Image (cartoon, coloured by chain):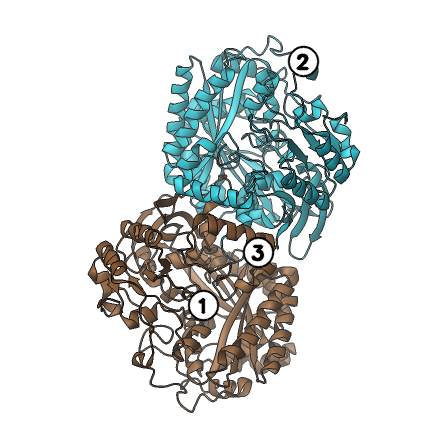
Chain colours: A cyan, B brown
């Protein structure tokens, strides 16, 4: 490897998350101001949060980073394309580009398990440079892995361990502009490397919003959302990324695959829908023409309580089938509701409201507080639309035995909605594994999915001899069904077996999805993590057709090989 | 060829349209009761409708049908699969399965131009039989062309003229059942060969509707809609077929590609969206799990008038961006509006209403009657939803200088909406070519599309030395744009040159779509007819990727070869 050395955060201003966890240095989850939290966690999974950091002193210097396999000739050719400032073989930068931010990724990186890291990282400045890099990859038989914000949790970014060819991580961070807004049509041309907050800022400045707010929003990119079929919290109004994406530019060997932005088309199998979710296997997405909306006049999130999960689900379904058109429909099951209460600060938010109201509730309604479910419904648009939708939803909530607890908790939810990964990392610091797994299924199957996942997770916890925790919420409602989003947690035995323990639980949950009519993933993609279930989801013939597509489009296997359909 | 002989209409009750035109025998367009129509047509294109039928005495016996290339061994093997009653080499049946119902198809079939017809027609009874036929096609190197209602107008059904292998038309007419409705989720499992009215009847009987009403509704099928990316008149509410289609079963060599019905999924490139629009090239669609809706409590179509095309378009755009959610948004340009008036019966419908109101309008508003544009907006749902939507739309109409003319014309439109193809055939009988071509484009480009198409069509009419007519309407509104649907007409010189004259006009219009940012087709598919423009629409790289998909999925080229990407 050459002597190219560069601090990753200084390359043309492209920022990365810390190498060992989510988000930026200096931001972290605290529990000191949430007195109920540590006892709650102690109770549900036995993890002791008050005894200081479990893993401390993480230092990049402690890692053994394998030597780069990129010849200086290859590095020179890359340098000739992007310039010396935009190529790096720096260990830290290579490590940062090795994994996404799943729990498995963090376990591996914290334990220094780095069987294969990208050999070189390049930061192209524009599409023309991407084209040259793509063509070089084919000519020199390199492996190219596009990298957005690095937030992926499905194993879509890591090089295959046995990969003998030089692996290039293509960091799209310099392509971060909103290039143009067609204000008449509500269509914005957006570069693939732009991260959520930066893009929203550019759009908001002109009165527009993309309306796409996945949990990863603060550290994920336009191109990444498209490449993994992302979905945001306000998808009920703005749609999944497949609805939002109208036009695309994808750099392929020899030229750009350009799909013009039209509202709908009858032009054979949808190339747009082949690129969406392709995780780099069909080329490098450089530009997305996305549907954007005028910033809403009014925006409000109201919290509701339901006496049971059954009632909460029934209400969400009734809302989805009604004339009401809220921007968010979300209801937590009893476990997640209890968890939410435990993370609240005293005198603030939902915890206090419920505490105040509890005696009254119990008396008047005869509710079982342990079965109670918290819901958030979002409203956006003209004041008149918001008022009318709230009225329609209010009726449905009432018909399903629920009650409003006002906008206070909703505001809190809105502020905290991107913080979960920090909590996950904090938990990991203290020896606990917390992770998420989500599916979508028809309304008729949601309860079966939920029941089976609980049973499967609890059986898996037994299997590994752990006191585990499982909880979920419904988000993303559709006419015919919804997304169920599960979070599970347990204390791992040791760093050596943590991944194996994790696998037992994760596999049980995924299999429960497939066994009950759900899909393997609603919005986290496939990568390597979910590839084993793809055949159960889309059938063997489906996988064969998909493999045929990839093989035909990438005969040399240069573009993120092994992802989605498996190595 | 063997001696298998069977009247096509008697095979297991599968009905077909007449071989020389649209629809069923005995149903036809009349102009006797529309006194303004013949003079109007005479004026705009010079065609004389009152002088009796131009083409008469069409008789299947006059056609020279090429001999079948199917060996008796092949026919025997097909017979062994489906039974003798469900295989036919009858000339009429083979002719019926040769083309769709485009003007080009009718010109060719009426002139007896049959360079290649299917060699044998089979009517499988179920998916298992389809599987055996598909496997036989690969084993014996046959060409398989799935056939639904035969309503296609993009050349998706015809065998390639140079095809030397035996061509089997796979008529799906016996698979016509709604198999199951998941009433909780609004998901219906529907067999691919079911035709519109039959399927709606089965669904309506249980209180449901698919809400999919393309112009071809009366003679098109579930499988055909999916295979060609159809869109119905009420797509604003129910979505295009790509929105409606949730699950799919597609018979491929060796097995079924099964996509489970989930509301949304993040499972790599969308196989569902590869099958949709695939026109038989990826296998045979046998079953669709479709999103269905409860029959609306109330349904109403209101007609509006706008002083200009510009105002009409602006109103539709404002509606699409508003909180209103109508089921239909449609506005005709001035030419099409004049055409609508000319087809009305005296004392009824829009013509009379406008006639009555005209003096008042002219006086009060100073409108130019020749520029006036007729619009239909549809409302469906609860009475309260309908009332509120009408109020919201009413405000937008007013703000764009339009006025309501009530529900009378809407009722008429609703009754007549599937009749246009009969009018087209009647016109053809009298020496006139009338055809349609549609696109979709962003709102910002619609006026440019419209202007360019008019200019291109008029230039093409000049080129062929004809007095031509072009008109259009907007239908299918989306957040970012809409579909523009053009109808053009002229009197052809003779049967010998009619196709060539047609080509000049058709090509000019298609090219105008592509030159102004539109797509080559909004809902009619690609087939052979639109294949020449595919590269301009989705780029050369896009076509290459699509070809790669087809070649990988169908190495022998057995499945409707040549369609979409060209022969």
Instruction: Specify few, some or many for label 2: CA neighbours under 10 Å numbering under 14, 14-19, or 20 or more.
Output: few
Give the mark count. 3
Judging by the rendered image, the residue that carries numbered circle 1 is: B153
Say yes or no: labels 2 and 1 on the same chain: no
Residue placed at 57% from the left, 56% from the top? Answer: A263
- The quarter in which the N terminus of chain B is drawn is bottom left
Label 2 – label 1 distance at C-alpha: 67 Å
Judging by the rendered image, the residue that carries numbered circle 2 is: A62
Label 1 – label 3 distance at C-alpha: 22 Å
Give left or right: position of B548 versus A401: right
Q: Secondary structure at mark 2?
A: helix
Give left or right: position of A486 versus B143: right
Residue B349 image offset from top left, x and y in percent: 46, 77
Give left or right: position of A5 versus B162: right
Q: Secondary structure at mark 3?
A: loop
Comparing A330 with B45, the one in front is B45
- Between tags 2 and 1, which lies in front? 2
Q: Secondary structure at mark 1?
A: loop
Q: Residue furthest top?
A: A51
Residue B284 image offset from top left, x and y in percent: 37, 53
Chain for disc number 2? A
């Amino acid at each position: 490897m050459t002597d190219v050395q560069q601090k990753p955060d200084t390359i043309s201003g492209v920022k990365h998350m810390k190498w060992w966890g989510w988000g930026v240095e200096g931001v972290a989850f605290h529990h000191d101001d949430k007195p109920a939290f540590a006892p709650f966690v102690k109770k549900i999974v036995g993890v002791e949060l008050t005894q200081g950091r479990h893993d401390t002193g993480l230092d990049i210097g402690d890692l053994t980073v394998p030597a780069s396999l990129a010849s200086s000739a290859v590095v020179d050719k890359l340098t000739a394309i992007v310039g010396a400032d935009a190529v790096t073989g720096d260990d830290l930068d290579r490590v940062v580009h090795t994994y996404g931010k799943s729990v498995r990724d963090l376990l591996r990186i914290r334990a220094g398990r780095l069987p294969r890291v990208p050999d070189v990282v390049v930061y192209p400045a524009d599409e023309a440079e991407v084209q040259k890099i793509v063509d070089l990859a084919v000519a020199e038989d390199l492996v190219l892995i596009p990298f957005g914000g690095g937030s992926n949790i499905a194993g879509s970014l890591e090089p295959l361990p046995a990969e003998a060819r030089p692996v290039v991580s293509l960091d799209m961070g310099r392509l971060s502009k909103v290039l143009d807004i067609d204000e008449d049509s509500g269509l914005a041309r957006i570069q693939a490397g732009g991260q959520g907050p930066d893009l929203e800022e550019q759009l908001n400045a002109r009165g527009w919003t993309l309306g796409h707010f996945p949990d990863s929003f603060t550290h994920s990119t336009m191109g990444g959302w498209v490449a993994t079929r992302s979905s945001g919290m306000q998808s009920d109004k703005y749609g999944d990324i497949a609805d939002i994406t109208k036009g695309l530019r994808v750099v392929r060997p020899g030229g750009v695959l350009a799909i013009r932005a039209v509202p709908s088309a009858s032009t054979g199998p949808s190339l747009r829908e082949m690129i969406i979710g392709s995780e780099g296997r069909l080329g490098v997405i450089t530009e997305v023409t996305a549907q954007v909306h005028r910033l809403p006049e009014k925006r409000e999130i109201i919290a509701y309580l339901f006496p049971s999960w059954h009632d909460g689900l029934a209400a969400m379904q009734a809302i989805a089938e009604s004339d009401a058109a809220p921007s968010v429909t979300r209801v937590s099951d009893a476990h997640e509701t209890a968890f939410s209460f435990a993370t609240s600060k005293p005198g603030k938010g939902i915890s206090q409201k419920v505490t105040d109201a509890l005696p009254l509730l119990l008396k008047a309604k005869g509710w079982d507080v342990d079965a109670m479910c918290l819901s958030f419904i979002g409203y956006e648009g003209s004041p008149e639309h918001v008022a009318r939708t709230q009225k329609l939803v209010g009726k449905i909530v009432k018909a399903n035995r629920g009650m409003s607890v006002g906008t206070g908790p909703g505001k809190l939810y809105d502020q905290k909605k991107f913080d979960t990964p920090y909590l996950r990392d904090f938990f990991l610091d203290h020896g606990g594994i917390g992770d998420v797994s989500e599916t979508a299924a028809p309304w008729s199957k949601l309860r079966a999915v939920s029941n089976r996942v609980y049973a499967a997770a609890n059986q898996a916890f037994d299997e590994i001899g752990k006191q585990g925790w499982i909880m979920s919420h419904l988000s993303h409602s559709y006419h015919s069904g919804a997304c169920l989003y599960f979070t599970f947690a347990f204390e791992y035995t040791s760093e050596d077996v943590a991944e194996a323990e994790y696998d037992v639980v994760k596999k049980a949950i995924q299999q429960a999805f497939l066994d009950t009519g759900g899909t393997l993933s609603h919005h986290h993609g496939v990568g390597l993590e979910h590839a084993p279930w793809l055949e159960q989801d889309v059938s063997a013939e489906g996988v064969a057709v998909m493999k045929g597509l990839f093989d035909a489009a990438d005969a040399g296997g240069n573009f993120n090989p092994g992802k989605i359909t498996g190595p």
